[in-house]
Amino acid sequence: MLAEKAGLALVTDKVAKKAEKTNDEQAWQAVLGRDRRYDGMFVYAVKSTGVFCRPSCPSRRPRREMVEFFEAPQFAQLAGFRSCKRCRPTELNGQRELPQVITRVCRFIDEIIEEGPTLDRLSEVAGVSPFHLQRSFKGALGISPRQYAELKKFLRFKTRLQRGDDVTTAMYEAGFNSPSRLYERSTSALGMTPSAYRAGGPGHAIRYALADSSLGRVLVAATEKGICAVRIGDSDKALETTLRGEFPKAEITRDDHELASYVREIVNAAEGKGIAREIPLDIQHTAFQWKVWQALRQIALGETRSYQQVAAAIGEPRAVRAVANACASNPVALVIPCHRVVRTNGDLGGYRWGTERKKQLLSAEKEQKAK
């Protein structure tokens, strides 16, 4: 109760109310695609209009820098945004349409605060067999009930840290029953320890470098553990702003000299030559994303795979959409070659850095392979 009051006392702070998702880029891709499966999981607000919407809202898409994501409509309202009159995100019928049994299980997971409800218990709630629940749940959402529960637990944990709770309070209020269970998962899920994440990365030294390539300007950022971000764009200022927005309290400095060897490798990759050596990474990811990204790194230079083929390769043949989302949320372009994944019919599909760059990159890699 005291932790709840402490969180509510800070609710007037706009930053504290922002519900940072496991990956904002994945949320942004859902908004761009008007993906109804994400309705009810978050809302997005547009700073220029003061309006918040469901991901599937039919309105024109705003610029990315004008968007904030919130866990629920009430947080967007408390931050001063008003509900969209077109998609009506505060109404129940604005939630994503799922089979009734899946909705019932999701609500049960959302409401309980405990360490991992078992599949047997969830099947009792659903009134179906564990096997049927697992298959149906994954078919509807692209992830298993266990993965959904993990996602929601970390979401509660991260939201409380953003509101100002200390790590211990946030841990227990989110449903973790021991520090070891939290910390063994936090580095891979948050990309840093919980206390560092809570404060926006203070004490984390992040160095970055910028370089030219045939694809445009390339930003490479690294912690002492490895590469944490690779971005492609046209403007140095925009690339730097995005990096600082992701780690607002980290010690971020430009260091072209120290990162020169990494930059050379990544620029070579941008020219279609691929990555010649293993590059250490320090990136946020879920277990599912990591499986997908590891599979992408197995795709040889000059070759492509379909989203369906990648899903089959990781043993999740029905999780095609989830694979596409994992590709879209890749934080280290070129190092993890998400550009090598295309649609089944051979169409390029989407690419965070633009389909023209994807087309150019694949063409250069095919030429390199032919040599």
Image: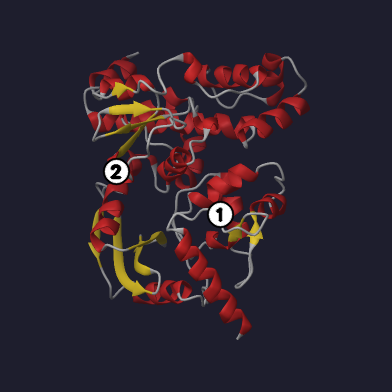
Name the residue located 57 percent from the left edge and 55 percent from the top edge: 293
Where residue 119 appears, as percent x and y from the top left, is 69, 25
Which residue has dot 2 on it?
A: 200
Q: Amino acid at mark 1?
A: Gly
Q: What secondary structure is found at the residue carrying circle 2?
A: loop
Q: Is residue 322 left or right of residue 259?
A: right
Reading the image, the residue beneath label 1 is 349
Nearer to the camera, 370 or 287: 370
Name the colour scheme: secondary structure
The numbered mark at residue 120 is none
- Is residue 26 rendered to the left or right of residue 100? left
Where residue 86 sits in the image (x, y, percent)? 39, 23
Query: Does label 1 or label 2 sit earlier along the sequence?
Result: 2
As rendered, which of 171 and 250 lies closer to the eye? 250
The residue type indicated by label 2 comes to: Gly
Q: Residues within 10 Å of mark 1 (few under 14, many from 20)?
A: some
Q: Is residue 247 left or right of residue 289?
A: left
- Quadrant containing the N terminus in the rendered view: top left
Residue 91 higher or lower than 307, as above or below: above
**Cα distance between the residues tagged 1 and 2:** 33 Å
Closer-to-camera residue (173/17): 17
Question: Which residue is located at x 60 percent, y 47 percent?
Answer: 323
Question: For numbered disc 1, what is the local secondary structure?
Answer: loop
**Residue 155 % position (x, y):** 44, 31
Residue 285 point in image, percent of width and height: 50, 47
- In this view, the mark in front (1 or 2): 1
Q: Quadrant of residue 14?
A: top left
Q: In this picture, is 269 found above or below 290?
A: below
Q: Is residue 201 visible?
A: no
